[in-house]
Amino acid sequence: MIGAQTLDLLFSFRTPPNYIRDIVIPPNKSIFYCSSGEHIVKSRLNKKKFKRKLEFRAEEPYYKSRFSPDGKYFVYTFKDNCLYLYKRTLTGYRFLQKLEGHDKTQSVISLCFSPDGKRLLSGGPQGELILWEIPSGKQLRKMQVPDRSTVTALALSGNGEKAAIGTMNSDCYIWTLSADTFSHSVHTGDFSPGSTLQVPSQLAFTEKDSAVMMIVYGGSKTLLHWNPANGKLSAMKTGGFIPNCFTFARQGRYLVAGTQKGELLFIDPRTGTLLKHLSIASVPVTSLALTPDSGILVSGDEEGYVSVWNSQSLFLQLGAE
């Protein structure tokens, strides 16, 4: 691992053999969970009480996975194209049920929990979308995006009323769940006319659900800001670094992105300005999570390393600049 100024590395560990797919820090907890494709590992955030414990192990590597925001539920997709739902217990994650409804000849590509963890959205080839009730597994909605293209990225708004959907055709839609309509759309390929595809790979609503932040990939990966109200699509300044994943900090005041070469980028999402960049690894950063006060940052990378950083002084420094 590579040290970084203004980020204090508290500790790190490795969960081979796969890259870190998802990290969640439950609110008001001093622990976090991470998923690596075969395992779920639980660890304390406190260096002095550092402890990690294997909470779950799959018999075979799973494809896509996601924690609910509170870490209470975990879902993954498997080669049978069903969704497997687990619930956290005192000793680990217990299997609840298998969710069936997607075309079994097609892989489920994208997963996303609502902020309250009570709903799950899944998407796959041919634009198929299913909204599930959690933990009952009841299907609440089943839709298909207008371009009938593979769903590559999903996000649910903070108020739970809207979903952002990215597709392989370089389109992004806003789905108003209560009305079963697609209210806005943008073609991300228009942002880079020289590239045939600019496919969304990660989506997230900004503070107050007013806009959507996304990473798109074509010839290279780009971090874009989309305002559905006026249709404006603009790029964040990344200093030539290639973003691979991102999360928000300080109630949306900052955006933290992990890159393909192991850097962290700190960006003002309102202006698109790159405020700071730091090198924390020699391989792609694949997942990021922050405590609610942004005082601790947890990063995961392609080699299966999980690192816990004290980020409090860094954000204080950014706020003073």
Image: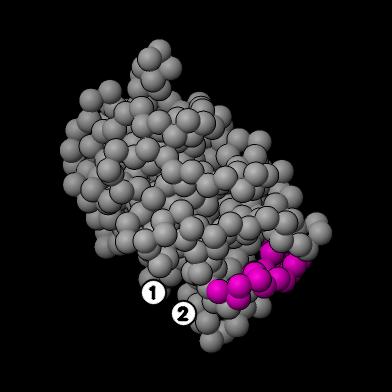
Eyeballing the image, is 257 above or below 99?
Answer: above
Residue at left 61%, top 55%?
A: 164
197 and 136: which one is in front? 197
Q: What is the magenta range? A: 129-149
Residue at left 40%, top 67%?
A: 196
Identify which amino acid the numbered label 1 is placed on. Answer: Glu
Question: What kind of element bears circle 2?
Answer: loop
75 and 44: which one is in front? 75
The C terminus appears in which quarter of the rendering?
A: top left
**Residue that lies at the very extreme toward the front in this rendered image:** 193
* Relative horizontal placement of residue 254, taking residue 237 as reference (left or right): right
Which label is found at residue 69? none
Eyeballing the image, is 269 above or below 77?
Answer: above
Can you give x and y, in whole percent of width and height, for residue 146 in the image? 66, 71
Give the residue number, with chain letter if any, for mark 2.
79
Q: Are marks 2 and 1 in contact (CB under 8 Å)?
A: yes
**Residue that lies at the very extreme toward the right in this rendered image:** 179
Q: Does the magenta segment cover residue 265?
A: no
**How did the renderer colour the structure?**
one colour
Give the residue number, with chain letter if any, for mark 1.
60
Residue at left 32%, top 28%?
A: 276
Identify which amino acid the numbered label 2 is placed on. Answer: Lys
Residue at left 34%, top 44%?
A: 258
Task: Answer yes or no: is residue 205 visible.
Answer: no
**Residue that lies at the very extreme toward the bottom in this rendered image:** 105
How many residues crowd around disc 2 within 10 Å: few (fewer than 14), some, or many (20 or more)? Answer: some
Eyeballing the image, is 150 above or below 26?
Answer: below
Can you give x and y, in whole percent of width and height, for residue 253 in the image? 51, 28
